[in-house]
Amino acid sequence: MIQTPSSPPSAEIFHAQNRENSFFSWVATVDHKRIGTLYLLTAFFFFCVGGMEALVMRLQLARPNNTLLSPNTYDQLFTMHGTTMIFLVVMPTLIGFANYFVPLMIGAKDMAFPRLNAMGYWFLPFGGLLLHFSLLAGGAPSVGWFSYAPLSETPFASSPGVDYWILALFALGIGSIATAINLITTVIALRAPGMSIRRLPLFTWMVFINSFLLMLAIPALNAAIIMLFIDRQLDAHFFLPSHGGSAILWQHFFWTFGHPEVYIMVLPAFGIISEVIPVFSRKPIFGYEFVAASTVAIALLSFGVWAHHMFAVGLGKPMDLFFAAASMLIAVPTGVKIFNWSATLWGGSIRMTTSMLFAVAFLLQFTIGGLSGVTFAVVPIDWQVTDTYYVVAHFHYVLFGGSLFGVFAGIYYWFPKISGRLLSEPIGKVHFWLTVIGFNMAFFVQHFLGLLGMTRRVYTYPDLPGWGLLNMISTIGAFLLGISVLVLIWNMVVSLRRGTVAGENPWNAWTLEWAASSPPAEHNFDQLPPIHGRRPLWDLAHPENQDEPNASREKSKETKMDKNKVGMMCFIASEGFFFIMLLIAYIFYNYSQHPYPGSQWLNPLKTGVFTFCLLSSSFTYWMSEKKLAAGSHNGFLLWLAATLMLGGTFMTGQAMEYWELFQKGLRAGTNLFSASFFMVTGLHGLHVLIGLIGLLIVLGLALAGDFKTGKTAIVKTIGLYWHFVDLVWIAVFTTIYIVGVRT
């Protein structure tokens, strides 16, 4: 039986019994539940900041020819609002829910890498502070959250705001990738006995797939912003057409990240809805397999539709036709989910809690956003509306009507588990109706503004028929949304103080998090129920009517992988995609255009000698692993030292090559060859340096005798990374020194 300790008294409301609650304990925590809570609180703070930025913009747009804000101030607010809501609100909120509930849902004690998890969180406030510090350092960025080149280049945006934007996004990207790797590893390696992949709760399943999107999409953004940073700081010209660069390449790179990003912000919300609707319909989800499979389809297709953001660029009919077809195709798996959720509601014993109200509203409003999105796949329609408020209405219906309504459903659903108290249902329903009315007033009318021709990204507009009235309605709706947030805050404060004690499972839900106390103990579970199906708590309460009645006699055939190996393989996949994007940029600038001076000074034969040293280091490291496995400590040290020597020789050779090129006057800002050459080889060299530091750590541990006890996981993990660095260099050497050298 499950042990069910009683709910803690009000004085201990956010914490398990006997847990230290000092400020420092929260700062230093590695508990996934506390980190999840920190994510949610930080994201909510930035939600209020981003919301206030939006309200000020709506005041400016409330009437025609308004002069409340200057054009530059409006552009800064516009950029900060978009960046804040996407990178500091929606993403971290969903990551916060994932942090808190994925380990609980799979029966794990914590995340696979607790310290990495903490590091991933602290990049969030660091990135947020970096972004907003720009206000004190010469002005916030004013180039939009998409930072289109060449407007984001120094000649057009000379203030340091764009540089802070780049650094903030890079920091946030590092944290997001670290968390994605952690979540993937946790799901693969730490599931409780009986929790097979096909029994994962759908929230966990969608977070799992979403983590792959994060892991592979953010490197495209990182590559783009590194190139932009090099342009701005080292006078390169990657995206300046006047110097041979390509502004269109920025759009390709950015939207390679940007369209998967849409699904990064919505897939976990799909997961929340997939938990809420079955529980409050008292029915299992209809078509579990289809919901799961359609998630995989969405993830795969999301990488093939980025250029539908670029139909107005002039890519040509073949490209337009391909991306139009792909854009229509990706609507199919999303439609499958809508059908499954609707079929789950059909014939269910529906309980209209506040959480369920938000879930049902999600279905309706996300469908509107999805249908308007499909219209952009029709190229002539896209040409007409792509730069209008029709687009603004569309993506707010997807991200607010979709993601944030899903988040609100999750707040009302899981708040009792996090706090031990139920949110007030009467106040919750006031919050719901204010949100629905305010949201639709604010954004539905913007469809008509777009069709009437009002362009987006403008700080004011002329007094044309209907424009002033529709904008005033939109502004009133935005302020109703602001009031609804105040109601939510009031509900949480009141409920924390004197809300109804929730108990372990107030909703009679079925997944494992409801088997823990509310809030959960530091170790999560005193005892797990047997897991024989997708609804373990249902099976426990209804042994005569289990989901999988014969599963208890089946032995699990799944083999768990080592978490260190899984984590490093995920990191390698992410960094591999990053280098693919860098090499694409190098090929674009050096293969498809007129040759730039500099490549003739490269010496493939000389560099080939140092390449041989680097590739040989993979063999020596492999030999060191063999010696360690055979119990030969001295042999292990000898081969490890040889690996360090060979890696150091390669770095010496690269430093010598750089010096020779500098002597000949080649700098990052000389031309596009030099910029792309130093970027690709320099970032690879940085990875080699990191690998050498890792090898030195292994050597130090070996000299201290750590590996005599048989703890060799770090050796294998560093080995995977070192072999990856060598493989990347093969691609770099082939691209630059063998194929790319011109005499």
Image (spheres, rainbow, N blue to C red):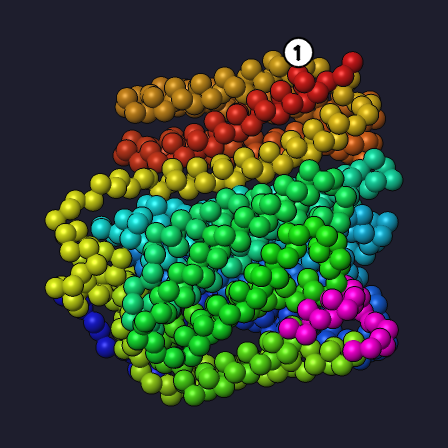
**Residue at left offset 64%, top offset 70%:** 50
Specify whether residue 49 is in view. Answer: yes
Where the N terminus falls, by quadrant?
Answer: bottom left
Q: Please state if 274 lies on the left or on the right of 486 as rendered.
A: left
Query: Percent position (x, y) of residue 727?
Result: 52, 25
**Residue at left offset 17%, top offset 51%:** 551
Asked if the magenta segment contains residue 460, the reply would be yes
Total labels: the figure holds 1
Where the C terminus falls, by quadrant?
Answer: top right
Specify whether residue 211 is in view. Answer: no
**Residue at left offset 34%, top offset 46%:** 188
| Residue closest to the eye, 4 or 659 | 4
Q: Give the range drawn in magenta.
A: 444-466
Q: Please state if 278 lies on the left or on the right of 260 as rendered.
A: left
Based on the displayed image, in which of its 4 quarters is residue 282 positioned? Answer: bottom left
Category of crowding for the residue at label 1, using alpha-carbon neighbours closer than 10 angstroms: few (below 14), some (14–19), many (at least 20): few
* Residue corresponding to mark 1: 605
**Residue at left offset 34%, top offset 56%:** 287
Give the SS element for disc 1.
Answer: helix
Q: Decide whether the magenta segment is chiefly helix, strand or loop.
A: loop
